[in-house]
């Protein structure tokens, strides 16, 4: 039987709650779809940091490297200054595991309330491919004359052909599995150096994918088009910082941060990929069962697609969409059920195989893209 080893990082706040709900769904998916997993809990996050002073130690990196995938909850606590855990754990993991892209679907499932008036599920089904290791996130920069009125802060953005090409190549492959349309999102009218490199990579890689239609949109214009006409996008590829920003906007379209999923993908198979809901640890509602587990369940679906379990991936996506579409509210007491109860509801649908299958499941498209990447060229 196929077996996958999963490192589980529940983290802080609502992280352990949504992770536990997602693991109940994983149990059901295994039973129904005929595979097994081994799971190792790794205690990274605020609590661990406050108790030990450790962020991401070399030993933890080595331990995680031995797994097929990482399932991540959320980290953060008001007791730790902003920036320490984000950079010391999340960004450190993305770098250490060479997670070249961050894959973030923007899909409005039927029945889910969206703040965008008149938006329908048919018009909102796109995927943002965010370059995940470079851009303004490389921590290159300096401050001179610090603490004086003359201080100067320089923060650089790094764009290598290598990393941009990997992100763009993945985005073209995904677009070929979908509706065949890829949009580059950048700011080439001002960031001309980086913009030139991204544009040249799009042209060069695009010559290998003649069936994919390409398009370009400035990032500021994207913030206008995305809520008003999301149907114009299929796959969008963009740099790390722009991707961070536009995917929060994308999350709003599909019902909020609690619903949005993400996958930090290692594309060369040398280290595990990591799957995390976009939301944070939400300490204000932790411990009450008020967090929506949908983002975690959809991240699990993406993990299954990445592991090659395409059918299970589509089944988990479909079951999550079915439960989500019937919720009276998307978070808090108004959901009418606790985080774990909702996870159990999704799990039951997966076990019975009774949820209507969503069409064009990104999660199973991902299984095909990954299989293509693993073929020797
Ligand atoms: C995200 C988050 C992270 C990012 C933070 C927590 C470092 O905003 O995953 O989008 O900026 O990438
Ligand atoms: Mg973000």
Image (tube, helix red, strand yellow):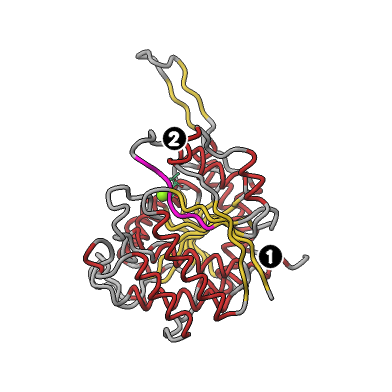
Q: Disc count in the image?
A: 2
Residue 213 in the image: state x and y as whole percent: 54, 69
- The answer to whether mark 2 is within 8 Å of ligand 1 is no
Frontmost of labels 2 and 1 is 2
Is residue 84 toward the left or the right of residue 211 in the image? left
Q: Is residue 82 magenta?
A: no
Asked whether the viewer can see residue 210, the reply is no
Is residue 192 toward the left or the right of residue 345 in the image? right
Read off the residue under disc 1. Answer: 373
Q: Residues within 10 Å of mark 1 (few under 14, many from 20)?
A: some
Q: Residue at x 33, y 39 (%)?
A: 78
Residue farthest to the front? 51
Quadrant, the N terminus: bottom right
Q: Which residues are magenta?
A: 71-77
Report helix, strand or loop for mark 1: helix
Residue 11 in the image: state x and y as whole percent: 45, 49
Q: Residue at x 39, y 50 (%)?
A: 245
Residue 32 in the image: state x and y as whole percent: 55, 81
Q: Residue at x 61, y 43 (%)?
A: 60
Read off the residue under disc 2. Answer: 50
Is residue 108 toward the left or the right of residue 92 in the image? left
Q: Earlier in the sequence, mark 2 or mark 1?
A: 2
Relative height, residue 37 to residue 152 (above, below) = below
Find residue 145 and report its image quarter.
top left
């Amino acid at each position: 039987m196929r077996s996958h080893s999963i490192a589980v990082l529940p983290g802080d706040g609502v992280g352990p709650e949504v992770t536990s709900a997602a693991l109940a769904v994983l149990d059901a998916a295994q039973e129904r779809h005929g595979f097994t997993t081994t799971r190792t809990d790794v205690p990274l996050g605020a609590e661990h940091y406050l108790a030990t002073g450790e962020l991401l130690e070399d030993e933890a990196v080595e331990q995680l490297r031995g797994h097929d995938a990482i399932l991540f909850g959320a980290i953060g606590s008001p007791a730790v200054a902003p920036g320490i855990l984000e950079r010391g754990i999340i960004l450190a993991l993305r770098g250490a595991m060479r997670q070249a892209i961050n894959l973030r679907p923007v899909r409005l499932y039927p029945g889910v309330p969206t703040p965008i008036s008149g938006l329908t599920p048919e018009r909102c089904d796109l995927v943002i491919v965010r370059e995940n290791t470079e851009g303004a996130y490389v921590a290159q920069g300096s401050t001179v004359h610090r603490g004086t009125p003359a201080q100067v802060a320089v923060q650089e953005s790094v764009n290598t052909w290598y990393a941009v090409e990997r992100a763009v190549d993945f985005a073209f492959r995904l677009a070929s599995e979908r509706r065949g349309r890829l949009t580059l999102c950048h700011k080439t009218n001002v960031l001309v150096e980086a913009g030139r490199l991204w544009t040249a990579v799009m042209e060069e890689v695009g010559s290998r994918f003649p069936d994919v239609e390409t398009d370009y949109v400035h990032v500021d214009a994207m913030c206008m088009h995305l809520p008003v006409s999301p149907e114009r996008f299929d796959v969008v590829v963009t740099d790390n910082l722009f991707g961070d920003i536009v995917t929060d906007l994308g999350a709003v379209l599909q019902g909020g941060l609690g619903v949005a999923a993400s996958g930090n993908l290692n594309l060369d198979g040398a280290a595990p990929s990591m799957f995390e809901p976009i939301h944070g640890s939400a300490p204000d509602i932790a411990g009450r069962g008020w967090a929506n587990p949908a983002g975690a369940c959809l991240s699990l679906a993406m993990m299954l697609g990445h592991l090659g379990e395409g059918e299970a991936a589509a089944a988990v996506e479909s079951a999550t969409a079915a439960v989500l579409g019937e919720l009276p509210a998307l978070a808090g007491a108004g959901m009418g059920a606790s985080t774990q109860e909702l996870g159990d509801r999704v799990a039951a649908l997966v076990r019975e195989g009774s949820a209507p299958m969503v069409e064009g499941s990104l999660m199973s498209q991902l299984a095909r893209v990954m299989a293509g990447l693993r073929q020797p060229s």
